[in-house]
Amino acid sequence: MHEGGGVGKAELANGFFGGYNPYALTLSGGWLHDGNWHHRGDVYLDGEAIGEQNTREDVTRLKGAWHAQVDGETTTLRPSGQAPALARRTGNLNIQSECERQSKSAA
């Protein structure tokens, strides 16, 4: 579905995720650039991860962006893009139940 303003919209019943909805859970920590609104899920279009944004308004300004909003019944994912182009793309979700933080530099 297309919401307008260069933003698509996919609504999923929260039950779709079973007992674990990664878009209802946020991550925080010094390794995240904004620290309090990143989710444990990710969104991909045509196999490429697109960047999570804090607000729907941020998605309207950026290509390759998405935003999640969860209420009591529905999880709404909003990817950036125009209606005809989004309709031709394949969307995937990546759901992380656990995240690790690297304690030492790999270099």
Image (tube, rainbow, N blue to C red):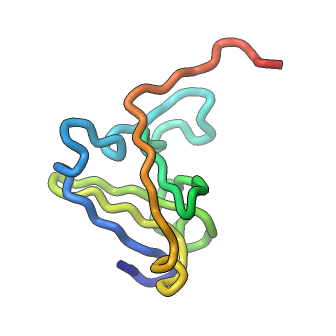
How far across and down, in percent of the image, does residue 49 sit?
Answer: 58, 53
Q: Where the N terminus falls, by quadrant?
A: bottom left
Q: Residue furthest top?
A: 104
Image-based side of 26 in relation to 51, left or right: left
Q: Residue furthest right?
A: 107
**Count of marks placed on residues:** 0
Residue in the image at 63% along x and 39% along y: 33
Q: 88 above or below 64?
A: below
Q: 90 above or below 73?
A: below
How far across and down, in percent of the image, does residue 35 sit?
Answer: 53, 36
How far across and down, in percent of the image, does residue 45 sit?
Answer: 54, 63
Image-based side of 72 in relation to 96, left or right: left
Residue in the image at 45% along x and 79% along y: 87
Q: 58 above or below 97?
A: below
Q: 68 above or below 60?
A: above
Query: 94 or 58: which is nearer to us?
Result: 94
Residue in the image at 47% along x and 75% along y: 7
Quadrant location of residue 26?
A: top left
Q: Residue furthest bottom?
A: 84
Image-based side of 8 in relation to 22, left or right: right
Residue in the image at 19% along x and 36% along y: 19
How far across and down, in percent of the image, does residue 74 sit?
Answer: 21, 58
Q: Where the C terminus falls, by quadrant?
A: top right
Image-based side of 75 in relation to 5, left or right: left
